[in-house]
Amino acid sequence: MTDSVSDSPATSAVDAEAPQTLAERGNNRSHRPTNQAFRDFIGSGWGPRPDTLPARNEAAPWAVARREALGARFPGDRLVIPAGALVTRNNDCDYRFRPHSAFAHLAGTGADFEPDAVLVLEPLAAGNASAKASGVVATDDSGDTGKAAGVPTHEAVLYFRPRASRSSEEFYADPRYGELWVGQRPSIDEVEAATGIRCAHIDSLPDALAKDAGPDGVQLRVVAQADAAVTALVDRVRTAAGLAAGQDAQQVDDALAEATSELRLTKDPWEVDQLQRAVDATRAGFDDLIRSIPRATGHWRGERVLEGAFGAKAREEGNGLGYETIAAAGNHANTLHWINNDGAVRPGELVLVDAGVEIDSLYTADVTRTIPVDGRFTAPQRRVYQAVLDAADAAFARANTPGCRFRDVHTAAMEVIAARLEEWGMLPDGVTAADALGPDGQFHRRWMVHGTSHHLGLDVHDCAQARREMSMEAELRPGMVFTIEPGLYFRADDLLVPEELRGIGVRIEDDVVVDPDGSVRRLTQAIPRTVEEVEAWVSGLIG
């Protein structure tokens, strides 16, 4: 990988006489010219840039509605939503950038936009005064943020670092922002055209945050976890303005993080379409993974062969992985978050694959299938697989029951799991499935320790900052997208498991959406899931 650059040899020779800090030593590997003749030369002879502006993003109109809903929750407050900064992997090498999900959701941007950017919802004095006076800012019965009855409460302003001119030092010498290093970055006009949001240079952010801030003026709220530098800037502004800052402002900031999370509990139609695209790309990734099974069985780290096949498709079809792929063969399937993927793939075993493609809009699928390496389940494998499938089907049926709450989906799956374990004689003596399901029982959870469902969207575990009453305890509502993923995990060294079932781990995970009529539909319906479908799928791809 190319090194970053430092001073000219002449300058470095002078500086070498003085002790260098650790930060300065990272620039010792290469040098850049600093003479004016070179600067004039490197800034000349370039062709004109394209003069056409990009089309408006597909997400832009949907993002307007999301910003309006969030702004109505906090009239009069300045809301600061950072995209986040690049994260150092080691020395001067960064991880690939992914913007904070709240930023991507509210700005309507996707992959790679834009390190250090900040979205600010700037309060509109007239709209806020009208909203507060009329009392139109409210929430509905479910707790969702309501709109201010058509009264605008905020203007969105997007602050970022636009590309520099070709005559600037940044153009050729800045490894973080320079065009010769990271490619052509957008201009203010281009981002305004794509997003429909007024844009400004990031250097003007401090003054914008400070304007009218104070106990009798504008309060500031920031998504504090998104960017430590932006949070520190907000705190400096708040301190100078006599507002609570740091830990004293945690409750203020947590309310904003909570609201941005709850705003995503129900997806708009554009988001549902993106999630379906992510699922479709994930199906393609599973197909390629299955095709790689013959090579995996001959490799000393066959699990990584499977992981790599899926990961290649994720990069080809989308932004990449929505999370680290689990490709767990044999007994490794009984470690819930097995991401080492360094084991062998052996004939006669099952391989549990939990994987999802994150597409360019940053929405991700989350799918698990348990696949027989030979294309056929053995009788014990089939018995465990069918029990898990029955639990998944029971959970899906419960979700389609009017008035179903999110937690009820898990309960329905556990009723089947407990019944099967009782049937197989695995519960303690004298304990029935009904006993196990009670609060003083839960013995079945030895073999199914995780929850059955979580929300899905921009994050694989979406809406994680939402209040429990808004998520786990809430009734299912149109636009909710979530997983159904029961499992059974029988470790090879678990002596309470019948011997023929030891070492078998099975999970089946589908992504579902609540449609406008209240019915629940599998986004993953096209990905084989029954015993017969899975066997035909594997046999059809590898023979």
Image: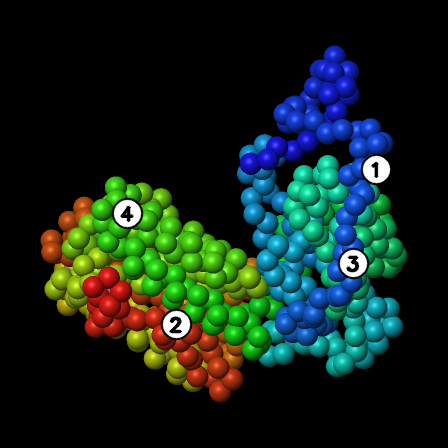
The residue that label 3 is drawn on is 188
Q: Which mark is residue 40?
A: 1
Residue 7 x, y percent position in the rendering: 74, 26
First in sequence: mark 4 or mark 2?
A: 4
Is 524 located above or below residue 221 in the figure? below
- Residue at disc 4, secondary structure: helix
Nearer the observer: mark 1 or 4; the answer is 1
Q: Residue furthest bottom?
A: 517
First in sequence: mark 3 or mark 1?
A: 1
Tally the numbered discs.
4
Nearer the observer: mark 2 or 1; the answer is 1
First in sequence: mark 1 or mark 4?
A: 1
Q: Are marks 1 and 4 in contact (CB under 8 Å)?
A: no
For the residues marked 1 and 4, what is the alpha-carbon distance in whole angstroms?
55 Å
Is 64 located above or below residue 44 in the figure? below
The residue that label 2 is drawn on is 524
For the residues marked 3 and 1, what is the alpha-carbon distance in whole angstroms?
25 Å
Q: Which mark is residue 106?
A: none
Q: Which mark is residue 302?
A: 4
Nearer the observer: mark 4 or 2; the answer is 4
- Residue at disc 3, secondary structure: helix
For the residues marked 4 and 2, what is the alpha-carbon distance in whole angstroms?
26 Å
For the residues marked 2 and 1, what is the alpha-carbon distance in whole angstroms?
57 Å
Q: Residue at x 35, y 44 (%)?
A: 340
First in sequence: mark 2 or mark 1?
A: 1
Q: Residue at x 48, y 70 (%)?
A: 277
Tell me the kind of residue under disc 3: Ile
Quadrant assignment for the C terminus: bottom left
For the residues marked 3 and 4, what is the alpha-carbon distance in whole angstroms?
48 Å
Is 253 located above or below residue 281 in the figure? above
Tell me the kind of residue under disc 4: Gly
